[in-house]
Image (spheres, grey):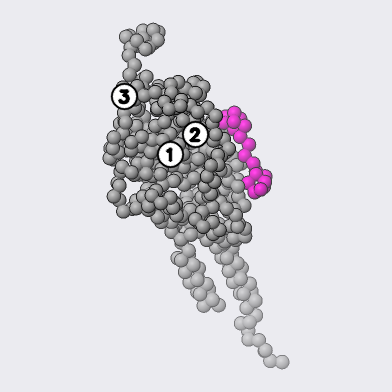
Amino acid sequence: MSNVFPKWSNTLPLKLIVFLLILAAAVVSGVTYYATPKYTRVGYEPSQPVPYDHSFHVGELGLDCRYCHSKVEESGHANIPAASTCMSCHSMIKTDSDLLEPVRASYASGEPIQWVRVHETPDYVYFDHSVHVNRGISCVECHGRVDEMEVVRHDQPLSMGWCLDCHRHPEEALRPLDQITNLDWVHPGGEKGQIKDGLKFVEEWNINPPQSCSGCHR
Amino acid sequence: MRYVYLIFIVGVIGALAILGPRGAKSTRPPLEVFPDMDRMPRYDPQAESAFFSDGRTDRLPVEGAVARGTFYENEYLATGKNGEYFGKGFPIDVSNEAMARGEERYNIYCAVCHGAAGDGDSMTKKYGMLTVANLIDQRLVDYSDGQLYDVVKNGKGLMLGYADRLSVEDRWNVVLYVRALQRAANGSVDDLAPAIREELGL
């Protein structure tokens, strides 16, 4: 019986298996690298109807976060300010700026400005701002250096693993309550001082961040 | 087989080039890889509604409704007025806690324009804020407590009110702290305790 299959077909299965293994490795690494909020969310910086510059208002003028996001200490939701908050100053400053036209229109009509949401956890996550800022977690831990951002950028992945990192080691992030909105605060004692004081806060404030499912998913 | 690998490598390089590194700036809305139940048909605060005619999920209270915790029987506490006239005195407990809270709130909401010392020297003034009141001026020292409270709540002249951002108690705490600033700025050597005066050699 003559050769039905040519000779090169002897090594074909092996070559195919090697190629499929390499392909599988490429797909797995691709998914690991890309299919995570570290890729899909971090870096998101939509253009807003009014190009509000945090780096100027917070960094330069020294506005406290709570001047605008005034309910963050009482509410689970950190509110976007009303147009009247902008008008507290802009009824006097830059009153003829074209960029501020939507603010003036909103103030006059009562129709809200349609800001584009940057940070958005899935709906099955019950994140509460007030409980974090009232217990020593600064804005900067999740939102990054907003006081240096001209356009607000998604800075941290806000993934579940990322949340749990902090819930397992709260002492690395806890800080004195009067430094919550001071975004460039770092513990004067460096990393060691942070851990030492962090552990003290955990003890004093009875910090016990939930790690069970129902802590955040209810 | 060589060609298969070549196509594969070209494919990988192409994908890397298009997808880019992690954290790259982008204005495109984030991709949700497995969007199961990520967005539920529920209302979030300050979000958009397809149901209500004004397109918002936030509803205004029905006219005449009073939200829980916002009704104060004590008229002076809520308005700063006794009948027609601004009243004197503090309807809250005057304590170190109230003063500390007042200082904190003052530094968030007031210092931006009135300055940390209350003298009206602030960053926003440099950028063209007009007629910022000098809180330590005799004119405002002469204001009654109720009148100061009313300015915090409802604003005055070009200043808009802070009723939406300061609770009734916090407004009084701020008035208390403003009184302290006025006291500090307009004090004299005689106000110091004898021991401190001695220490300073006055």
Give me the disc on residue B167: 2
Counting from the top left corner in percent of width and height, residue B20 is at: 46, 61
Left of B20 or right of it: where is B157? left
Q: Which residue is mark 3?
A: B139
Secondary structure of residue under mark 2: loop
Residue A36 position within the rendered picture, expressed as x and y whole percent measured from the top left: 55, 57
Give the answer, above or below, for where B175 lies relative to A72. Answer: above
Amino acid type, mark 2: Ser
Give the CA distance from mark 3 to mark 2.
26 Å
Q: Nearer the viewer, residue B104 or A198?
A: B104
Query: For the residues carrying marks 3 and 1, which lies nearer the camera in this image?
Result: 3
B194 vs B33, left or right, is left
Q: Which residues are magenta?
A: A200-218
In space, the residues marked 3 and 1 are separated at their CA atoms by 27 Å
Task: Name the foreground residue: B192 vs A187.
Answer: B192
Q: Marks 2/1: CA distance?
A: 14 Å
Could you tell me if the residues under marks 3 and 2 are in contact, i.e. CB atoms within 8 Å? no
- The residue where tag 1 is placed is A67
Q: Residue furthest right?
A: A1
* Earlier-in-chain disc, 3 versus 2: 3
